[in-house]
Image: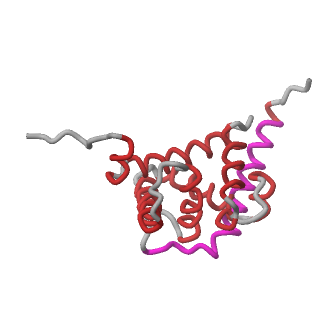
Amino acid sequence: MSLVTRRQFIKVGLAGAMLFAAARMLERPSAAAASRYRALDEQSAATVEAFVPVVLAGSLPEEPAARARAVREVVEAFDRAVSGLALATQEEILQLFSFLHFGPTRVAFAGLWAPVVDSSRDELRDFLLRWRASRFDLQRASYNALTQLIQAAWYGNSSSWAAIGYPGPPQLP
């Protein structure tokens, strides 16, 4: 068994940071900030939209129009939540999206051959399960950030409360 030296650890960390930066720089020109979102661009919003039915499987309304409205509301709430985070955290989340949008990094580290928006629900579910159980802290942290923000965006939405038996916040006199 080989132990990782401090120097190897630093080299891997620097290589990872450069990889994220390269993915962000190469992906960025095609993803100009959208005026309707506070933090996300259109491509990142579409990525969140693709993940919502996977993360919230069994929780969203069945009726197509209500489901589409719920997904849209989750994406908007996700964006509001990200925009309220510290700037360094916002940048990390946007780097995650750049990482998922840039083909070589998406294939190598996420195992998704197709862009997220073109992947099937099964492929996205399998990807999320791999990252949830990954031995790498960065992948587990990315999984947690993505799924927890989506879940919070849904369960913070008053239209989800009836399905979970939550009557809403108490009325103050």
Specify the farthest residue to the front: 63
Residue sitting at x 42%, y 72%: 36
Residue sitting at x 54%, y 56%: 52
Q: Which residues are magenta?
A: 8-35
Say whether residue 101 is left or right of residue 45: right
The picture quadrant where one finds residue 21 is: bottom right
59 or 18, which lies in front? 59
Specify the farthest residue to the left: 173
Q: Quadrant of the N terminus?
A: top right
Measured from the top left, where is residue 162 in percent x and y?
Answer: 33, 47
Q: Quadrant of the C terminus?
A: top left
Say whether residue 121 is left or right of residue 108: left
Q: Is residue 114 rendered magenta in the image?
A: no
Figure check: 2 above or below 101: above
Residue sitting at x 74%, y 55%: 18
Measured from the top left, where is residue 158 in percent x and y?
Answer: 32, 51
Q: Is residue 12 rendered magenta in the image?
A: yes
Figure check: 7 above or below 146: above
Specify the farthest residue to the right: 1
